[in-house]
Image (cartoon, rainbow, N blue to C red):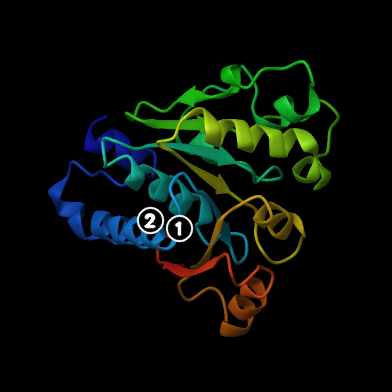
Amino acid sequence: MTPAQLAERSIIPYLDGANRQLVDSFRDLRTRLLAISNDNFITLVVPVSKGCGGSFVARNLALSVTFDQSKTALLIDCNLHSPSQHVSMKIDTARGGLVNYLEDPESEVDPMIYGTGIPRLKLIPAGKSTYGDVESEHFTSFRMRLLLDSLRSSYSDRYIFLDGPPALGSPDARILSELADVVVLVAGYGRNTPADIAAAAGSFDPRKFAGVVFNENA
């Protein structure tokens, strides 16, 4: 994609030198994660609250992994109540997504994996439930664990990023953290109070908690 197309999708236009500082910020985050984790790890990215730009950070952190041509990234939209990745990336999700896979025991995972137009970066969108509302129990199901195990083991060079729901207000993010190796918390710069950030961080296992990213793009 051209820098203009990348910017339209809220993706850091890494071909545009004018954005080098932003690109380097994500490269630094990626390098820190690689330093504290084993190969082929699963990262959960969650905002403190709605509107912090957690999906923006998840998308571009996944992208930053693909700067290394020996690595690939898979982004999974796990914010089932407010999915946004397919909208931001302008992807037609006619084949369904994560929820459809979890609800249909006969479905296969391959059709749920979409190209993004960016080399080595794939997306599994949230999809839409056939039963109306979606529940946290989707993430505690055996099928969800099987999916992540399968996605991780299929490609040794694949890094998985889960775009999660807000840490405050529901148990979904905490439940998802049990499936991840690393948790990154996103706070909206000037939006979240220190008390909110501390409360959100306290939801996660400190052994998995990598730290807080302050996002000015919220």
Q: Are marks 2 and 1 in contact (CB under 8 Å)?
A: yes
**Image height of 19 relative to 150, above or below:** below
Residue 151 in sight from this viewpoint: yes
Asked which secondary structure carries label 2, the reply is helix
Asked which secondary structure carries label 1, the reply is loop
Percent across and percent down for residue 44 are: 56, 53
Q: Residues within 10 Å of mark 2 (few under 14, many from 20)?
A: some
**Image height of 31 relative to 17, above or below:** below
Percent across and percent down for residue 132 are: 84, 33
**Image height of 159 relative to 195, above or below:** above
Count of residue discs: 2
Q: Quadrant of residue 170?
A: bottom right
Circle on res. 37: 1
Q: Residue at x 65, y 46 (%)?
A: 79
Could you tell me the amino acid type at mark 1?
A: Ser
Percent across and percent down for residue 214 are: 44, 70
Residue 116 in the figure: left or right of residue 17: right
Could you tell me the amino acid type at mark 2?
A: Leu
Q: Quadrant of residue 84?
A: top right
Residue linked to disc 2: 34
Q: Quadrant of the N terminus?
A: top left
